[in-house]
Image: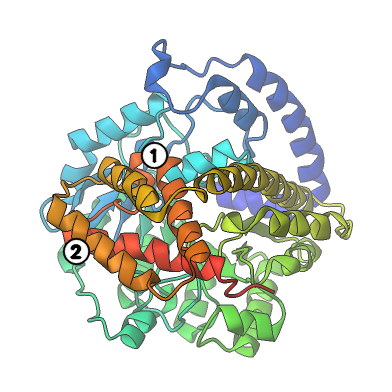
Amino acid sequence: MNINKIRKVFYKYPKVLKLGYSIAKSIWRIEAMYKDYDYPNDESLATIDKNTVKEYNKNRILGPKKRICYAAFNNLHFTMNGDVYSCCYSSGMYLGNIRNNSIKEIWKSENVNNAQTFLSNYNMSKCLSCKEVLTARNYGSFPGLKYDMYSKDTAFMPTQMSFELSDLCNFACVMCNEDYSSTIKKIKGIPLNKNFYTDTFLNQLEEFIPYLKIATFIGGEPMMIKIYYKIWERIIKLNPNCIIHVQTNGSILNEQFISFINSGNFEIGISIDSLQKSTFENIRKNSNFDIVRSNLNTYLKFHQQGKIILSINFCPIILNWKEIPEVVNFANANNISIKIIHVTRPRQLAIIYRSVSYLQNVVRFLNNIALEQYNSPISNVNNRIYDDFRNILQFYIEDGLKREDFITVRMRLAIAEIYDQLKIEIIRHSRIEFNETDLQNLFDTLNQTLQFEPMNIKKRVVISVLYILRTSDVQKSSMEVNREILTEIKLFMKIVEEQLQIEKGVFDE
């Protein structure tokens, strides 16, 4: 069955899709209440409760399914340093490295079996950002939805692969960092990444390509990454039915890629954080909005001609949240999907860390704006995603109230007492062993950063960081991936510096 052709038929005949999807949704909501989800008898194995599982499956775009996420069952994700994971959203599901093992060895490894066991038990302790989305009831933006299309409990070969092979990028977006943008690396004077993907890797891929249903390409900026063009050629030659999804910033659209588009196998996701030139260029540093808008119009024509399926990614931060309704309306008017990304970093730009009064203002503003009405299945799904985003704001407010209570109580303490509590949390969260000298170095750095700040600001920053650590799971803390003391301290101080900007009102409107 060629899913790509079926979806294009539905895009061409939206009334058929609307009727069919409406009937299916009604059936799925009933099915979700009674489906056997194979929830573990030992509930301590799970980190997602049964009620959340049922509610999520009621709202699952393709209907209820046995697994909370199928990434570990169907997908391999290749990263810039050669590491391979189950998906692009979690560094917890590590499977191997292509410098040490072949693709086949990684796919057949015990690490894959372990990842599948975790998800089978509804244990998302290694997928904390995704768990957070579910906990906040933001079901329409749950990253695991992308693996539902070709979901299987067991797969002889991966049905999906995602590629994040390079950080080459011409933008320096404010919510990005040097790990994902070569431009930001250059600005900060950091050496560029080495390339670990050779012809050997390309040759190994050829065994897997015939089994793929979809291959996803992210960056960096995919249009700048030469090896992607070689992989696209191989996919089109060896598996013409495979969908190729490319997530682009929209700044580059060359003749070679247009020739690939004419093969009819492409889904294009374009990052549009504003339709206003000033806001867009303020967020997507080093961009030219006029070029992106021109390329977006070209993609829209390809979409209308049925050559591609186009979608939009929107990252809501404090610089652009007022423009969400406008971008949703634009997507609905052009019958393209929108995804509203759950943004948590950098903290000084993320909506989730703003004050309760700020969040309440966001809710009031969005509630007073009515979306334009478009009678199509795509717009119905987009509107539901928008409603999910508004619902998650209520979750942010609830967390904000808890955070403010936590801060208020501890503002009465002396700074030394607050530091003592912070030391305990740092030790608890770290995946390495801090000795007294290490801790003293960390707090010396902390004091140096805050030395000229008023005591009330200093306290609020430290208490806020304490709250972040105390309310997060171990792997979600700043002590997340790296094991070197110096790196741990830098990661911790990044949280402190971001929190300081929040408390001082940097970027506030």
The numbered mark, 1 or 2, whose residue comes first in the sequence reads 1
Q: Identify the residue position indicated by label 1 in the image.
A: 473
Quadrant in the rendering for residue 340: bottom right
**Count of numbered badges drawn on the protein:** 2
From this view, report whether residue 375 is shown above or below residue 448.
above
Q: Looking at numbered disc 2 in the image, what kind of residue is underneath it? A: Leu
> Can you see residue 213?
no
Q: CA distance from mark 1 to mark 2?
A: 22 Å
| Residue 260: % across, % down | 47, 73
Task: Please tell me which residue lies in front, 333 or 396.
Answer: 396
Q: Secondary structure at mark 1?
A: loop
| Residue 111: % across, % down | 22, 37
Q: Residue at 46% x, 40% y: name it.
A: 471
Task: Please tell me which residue lies in front, 30 or 492.
Answer: 492
Q: Residue furthest left?
A: 100
Task: Please tell me which residue lies in front, 201 or 85.
Answer: 85
Quadrant in the rendering for residue 45: top left
Task: Please tell me which residue lies in front, 335 or 99.
Answer: 99
